[in-house]
Image (tube, coloured by chain):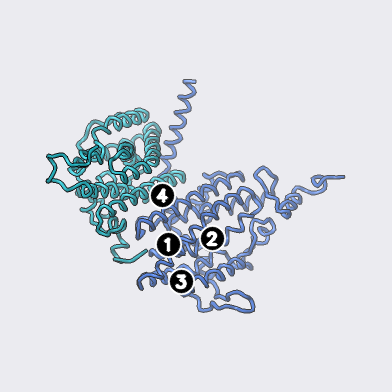
Amino acid sequence: METLEQVLTPEEQFQAHIDADIRIEPKDWMPDAYRKTLIRQISQHAHSELVGMLPEGNWITRAPSLKRKAILLAKVQDEAGHGLYLYSAAETLGTSRDQMLADLHSGKAKYSSIFNYPTLSWADMGCVGWLVDGAAILNQVPLCRTSYGPYARAMVRVCKEESFHQRQGFEIMQTLCEGAPAQKEMAQEALNRWWWPTLMMFGPKDADSPNTEQSMKWRIKRFTNDELRQKFVDMMVPQAEFLGLTVPDEKVKWNEARQAYDFGEVDWNEFWAVVKGNGLCNHERLQARVQAHEEGAWVREAALAHAAKRKERAAVTA
Amino acid sequence: MSATLPETLAGIVPAAPNLLFPFVLQLADTSLILAHRLSEWCGHGPVLEQDLALANIALDLLGEARSYYQYAAELEGQGRTEDDLAYLRSAVEYRNPLLVEQPNGDFAHTVVRQFLFDNFHYHLLQALKESADAQLAAIAEKSLKEAAYHLKWSSEWVIRLGDGTAESRQRLDKAIAALWRFAGELTTPTTTETCLQRLGLVPDYAALLPAMEAHVAHVLGEATVPVPEAVFAQQGGKMGRHSEHLGYLLAELQYMQRSYPGLTW
């Protein structure tokens, strides 16, 4: 009897593992393209956590109550934690955090475009939690079963915290909607601004998403962009109705035959403009990251220099 | 310890619960203002791990502040809430020492500010957990573990920056020169604190000094930094006379409550 290894090429064995839902681990053989795609996707995800701290960080010092301040600060801190898990997961593929950050700062690596929109009112903290984290969860829950082991395990932890984030966002919206007219107005105004950009979070239409097919085959991705976008609309429209808010899309209508909501077309010109760096905050967000990194250089150098001195002294006394 | 006023003070100062209110408020303001300053770092730290650490310390202090505000509201008994106390008092009513309202500056300034505060905070809580006031003792007990971690964090960073590179040393020296003058206020009792000390509700600060000074000497020794000579100690924050920085901080902190009075968030 010949073994599988003798009959199948490494590429075929790899795909057989994927098809059998066997996790790929760091030391396993994998095609270069799989490795590259994962590094791109995981680092992009890590960068999104890092940059995502900024729009919410913008309201920590202005949160309207001590309880809200504590919850928001804890939430943004969670995002820093997610960034750490994800950078570590990507490092198992043979890249380094320094390299990934250099790519972020040079503009070579992307992060989620949603963070290039400004947070202008307290209700934006509600919308970011409710809609943006809601969309992120739909994107991320399937990743808990993604084919690459370290990524899947990182995502299990991330998803647990994200669902808490989404609930707190919804709760902010609910409090606003049950509050004074000025608060409800604030909630509606924020929804008007965030609705379409969150629909864009699922990426281009399937027809314009050339990587989807390969990613589905590798089980890095489990649903297409349009499938997830539809799920999101189906989930959120009733929630908005529950809150007494109106989704800013006149074409939203329940389709009995499809058992799903019909909805209007995303403004793809805006989508591509923001992806290409022309969103209102692209410049500021990246600048804030570059500045933090550059201004932190002397701190990182001091820590390394001190550690080296200690090591040297320990060697002398040993 | 006895909770009655010494004869010399009887009739001059209000009874203990009323004295306790401004003191607890002072503790609350102190933790809140420093938490607020630290939270300004969120997303801008020198490295992701330290972003997390700074947010962690901010969260601890914010939690501690809330415990004190809730207790202060209870002591006052006028129906005010923690948020009323934090969001609806003006700068002259705030009772935090000057040190904690100082701007973040560079990482060295933040570290030195934190080190000076943590050294006091840790030793204060350790004594305060023996307070004759059970509620204060309970909050101190709960916060002490966190404060021990904060002191470890800031001490380690003073050492790294002092005994790191030439640049980090120079920045640390500058921060020490800028902030050392605010340390003295922490251990200089106000009249309220003196009264509470005599009632056994608040520890005698003079008794904390030897341990605090020993820790400073140890950490600066490790950092290869000479202990600064005694400097003129700036005072006033604990009596509501603040630096210009606090007004801006409160304008931001209180923005929502001031813009939309009386609403629930």
Q: Is residue B193 visible?
A: yes
Task: Kindly indicate which chain is depicted in cyan in the rendered structure.
Answer: B
Residue A289 % position (x, y): 44, 51
Q: Position of residue A183 (x, y in %)?
A: 37, 69
Q: Are marks 1 and 2 in contact (CB under 8 Å)?
A: no
Q: Which of the labelled discs sits on residue A243, or is there none? A: 3
Residue nearest the observer in this picture, A258 or A280: A258
Q: Check chain identity for marks 2 and 4: say if they share one.
A: no
User: Which residue carries the number 2 mark?
Assistant: A136
Q: Residue at x 50, y 54 (%)?
A: A49
What is the crowding at mark 2: few (fewer than 14 residues within 10 Å), some, or many (at least 20)? many
Which one is closest to the eye, mark 1 or mark 3? 3
Residue A202 position in % (x across, y down): 56, 64
| Separation (CA) of disc 3 from disc 2 | 21 Å
Three-letter code, disc 3: Leu
Provide residue B254's location: percent of width, then percent of height: 30, 59
Q: Residues within 10 Å of mark 4 (few under 14, many from 20)?
A: many
Check the image and report above or below for A21 versus B234.
below
Q: Secondary structure at mark 4?
A: loop
> On residue B44, which mark appears?
4
- Please name the residue that numbered disc 1 is placed on: A125
Kindly identify the amino acid type of the residue bearing the numbered disc 4.
His
Q: Residue furthest top?
A: A317
- Residue drawn where x is 25% and y is 41% of the image: B201
Q: Secondary structure under badge 1?
A: helix
For the residue carrying disc 1, how many other residues have a C-alpha within 10 Å: few (<14), some (14-19), or many (20+)?
A: many
SS for callout 3: helix
Distance from disc 1 to disc 3, alpha carbons, whole Å, reads: 16 Å
- Indicate the quadrant where residue A218 lies: bottom right
Asked if labels 1 and 4 share a chain, the reply is no
